[in-house]
Image (tube, rainbow, N blue to C red):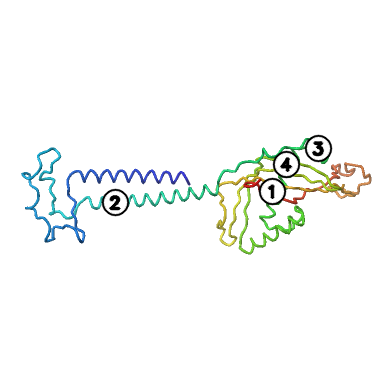
Amino acid sequence: MKENFKKLIIIVLVIGVFLATFSLVRADSGWDTSYDTGGGWSSSSSDSWSSSDSWSSSDSWSSPNSWSSSSSWDYSDSSSSSSPIFGIVFLGYIFLIIILGIYFSHKKGNSKSFKPVVLKTKLFNDVSEDLVKQMLPEYTLKSLKKELFNKFVEIQIAWMEFDYDKLRTLCTDELYNSYIAQLEVLKAKDGKNIMEYFENVAARVYEIKKEKNVITVEVFMAISFYDYVINTKTNKITRGNNREKITNNYKMTFVISNKKQEINNCPSCGAPIKDGSSTVCEYCNSTIVKHTREFVLSKKTNINDGE
């Protein structure tokens, strides 16, 4: 889009300069412009100069810059050739001004929408691998970040699709109720929030703590994605745009229950598990994961402009 504007401006400038140059050359060849406006001089006016009143060669100045008979005001040709040229030049520059106005207003609008986002990674430091192993032995620091990012994406997709049942499993009750209220307003306005092509730009797990049977994980993430709203009836974009990704800095709080889930049947084949300590099904040889704990989002804060 910007390249097209630049090309158009260059073309208009070249045409404008060409027409202006042509007009100036015609003007320099002689004073042949007639004044035929309502209050001006014209050949039909009784107050106009006749050909006999024009400057002749004998009346001209003798200096090189003097007016000769060829420089006299010729009223016999009232339809001057420079008038239409002047009009073309004038219209060309009016057109140029309009194009420049559109371009700079477009550029100004984009600068507001796409102002650079400063990543806040320096404000947060990762916890140690030892703490992760102590609190969440099934994870490493890297796999924990990946898991939390995937949860974020799942929540965004459920939001986009108005999937209330999925949101209920991914959020705490308080956050879920807040999301539903916002989605109902969006739906009433025939809106749909499109979010796609998520990219985890940076992540820091900066706190893990345990209270009773609940583990709380505090994570910072800088996430890039397309984010805009469309009207579901017209499919036209009503907010944001689909041309450039945004990058948001988030502080998110996830919670997870520390209780172990008792598994009595194999998730793969359904066979009963006789040995409670077994990690492999004796019928289908599937691995049995007994720590099926799910992270739930309890808080999310966009800190692009704050903190």
| Residue type, mark 1 in image | Val
Residue 120, given in percent of the width and then of the height, sits at 65, 41
Name the residue rendered at 79%, 46% in the picture. Answer: 216
Residue that numbered label 1 is attached to: 153
SS for tag 4?
helix
Which residue does the image show at 27% across and 43% down from the upper left? 21
Furthest residue in direction right, as rendered: 274
Name of the residue lying farthest toward the front: 307
Marks 4,2: beta carbons within 8 A: no
Locate residue 274 relative to residue 88 in the image: left or right.
Answer: right
The answer to whether residue 21 is left or right of residue 160 is left
Disc 1 is placed on an element classified as helix
Q: Local crowd at mark 4 within 10 Å, few (<14), some, or many (≥20)?
A: some
**Label 1 close to label 2 by CB (< 8 Å):** no
The CA span between labels 1 and 2 is 57 Å
- CA–CA distance in space, label 1 to label 4: 11 Å
The answer to whether residue 2 is above or below residue 130 is below
Q: How many residues crowd mark 1 within 10 Å: few (<14), some (14–19), many (20+)? A: some
At label 2, which amino acid type do we have?
Answer: Ile
Q: Residues within 10 Å of mark 3 (few under 14, many from 20)?
A: some
Q: Mark 4 and mark 1 in contact (Cβ < 8 Å)?
A: no
- Disc ID at residue 131: 3
Q: Residue lying furthest bottom in this view? A: 188
Element on which disc 3 rests? helix
Tell me the number on the disc at residue 88: 2
Q: Amino acid at mark 4?
A: Lys
Looking at marks 1 and 3 on the same chain, the residue that comes earlier in the sequence is marked by 3
Sequence-wise first label, 1 or 4: 4
Which residue is drawn at the image coordinates 7% and 47% (left, top)? 56
Disc nearer the start of the sequence (4/2): 2
Q: Is residue 184 left or right of residue 210?
A: left
**Residue beneath disc 4:** 146
